[in-house]
Amino acid sequence: MQRSGLKLFPSSFWKSRRVEKSMRRVLPRSLLARSLLIVFIPLLITQGIALEVFYGNFLQVASRRLSDSVTSEIVLSLNALEHLKKPADRQWFVEQAQQHLQLVESWHSNARLRRFGSTHVLGPMDEDLARALRASISYPFFVNWREDPHTVKISIQLPDGVLDVEAPRKRLDMGQIWLFVAWAVGSSLLLFVIASLFMRNQVRAIRRLAHAAEQFGLGRDIGPIRPAGAQEVRKAAVAFNRMQDRIYRFVSQRTGVLAGVSHDLRTPLTRLRLSLDMMPRTGMVRAEDIQPDVEDMIGDVAEMEHMIASYLAFARGEGAENVAETEIEPFLEDVAAAARRAGAHVFSVRVAQGLRVHMRPDAMRRALTNLVDNARRYAKHINLSAQGRSDGVVVMVDDDGPGIPPERRDSVLRAFESGRGGGTGLGLTISRDIVRAHGGEMELLDSPMGGLRVRLFLPR
């Protein structure tokens, strides 16, 4: 079975895996080192290509042309010396060559060369000059590049002696190659240092974000981090600060819920205990005699069930539902229809046709139902409306009730802050948490109908 399983993957797959593992061992592990490697390798390849293009094309072409020029002048000198028989004429030509051709020529009668070829130096000029001399003259020669750093000595073996020709080195040597190499290496190092400084700053911002996430995961409150670095890193830092704030607010609210459970359940539990203690322990008991007490206990149990359901709904949250693109008009019509069945008088629903937004439909239906139920307790008429914006959708719930004073609007959004109609004080809090989970915000305003307006903003 193992062999048949291995045959499912081609050999190239296993080779690529081995290559990948080998590369992983060689490559650095830190982000800074890998980033610098990503910068350095293309820079090195680019400079190498530029150097090769310069060295392989321009430098060689220029060197060949310079070597051909000097060789042509040497051939001209040989031809002239062969035709000029008189010593005075030869001396005159040597002086002319030195003056106009920058060639210093000297004749050694009956001398013999002991070395042939060329001394090798860095660059293509030695090979180009030797090639040009072989192609132009039929006499043996020796080129000495190292005797004098400013001149190149060319010795030519003639039948009756040796002709020494000293040519300026600058006519053959492309000295700019050193300048180009120095510029290439220096600019590469400079760019690499600058890239290292920039990359270190970027990596420092990422490390700071990673450290903050690690400390936050350990439960240590280090406060919001300062956004720094590239735009993407800054956005990540801002998102982390918002996430941290939401989680702290979430934990604080849930902690408040747990603390309030025992307080709110204590009253019905105490009534149940008193009712049970006052029931007779002995003798015959008629059902008619304890009917009022039983009804009171049933009411207390129902009240406890309602409070516990509200607590569980608040603590559970709505994060498990998937986000879907929803059309607002039929969605609000469904909410209004459900509210009318519950006894609310929804006066109108005004929504622009075709208005859509991404949201969790069940969670948002629950949030709007809570708002409509709160309005139903205090108002006779309720209006639902929605309008689009460039960055999202605004949904408004208006009523004609007494409203909420501006100084109390922040407090009623906190858990267990119930209004005059009773309740657990979690309806508005649950609705606000659902809206914030969508990335939006909820605020309480004055309504044109004279009561309260709850304004919900949902981003697109």
Image (cartoon, helix red, strand yellow):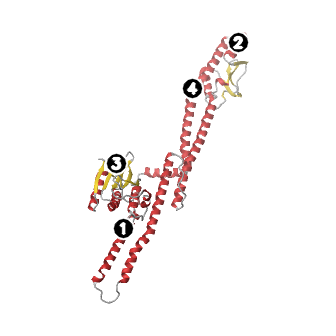
Q: Quadrant of the N terminus?
A: bottom left
Earlier along the polypeptide chain: callout 1 or callout 4? 4
Q: CA distance from mark 3 to mark 1?
A: 33 Å
Which residue is label 1 attached to? 309
Which residue is label 4 attached to? 61
Q: Nearer the viewer, mark 2 or mark 3?
A: 3
Residue 338 picture location, percent across and down? 28, 59
Which residue is label 3 attached to? 387
Earlier along the polypeptide chain: callout 2 or callout 3? 2
Counting other residues with Cα less than 10 Å from the Cα at mark 1, is it few (<14), some (14-19), or many (20 or more)? few
Residue 133 picture location, percent across and down? 62, 22
Which residue is label 2 attached to? 90
Q: Amino acid at mark 2?
A: Arg
Q: Nearer the viewer, mark 4 or mark 3?
A: 3
Rendered view: 170 above or below 267: above
Q: Amino acid at mark 4?
A: Val
- Could you tell whether 274 is left or right of 205 in the image? left
Q: CA distance from mark 2 to mark 1?
A: 122 Å
Counting other residues with Cα less than 10 Å from the Cα at mark 4, is it few (<14), some (14-19), or many (20 or more)? some
Earlier along the polypeptide chain: callout 4 or callout 3? 4
Q: Amino acid at mark 1?
A: Ala
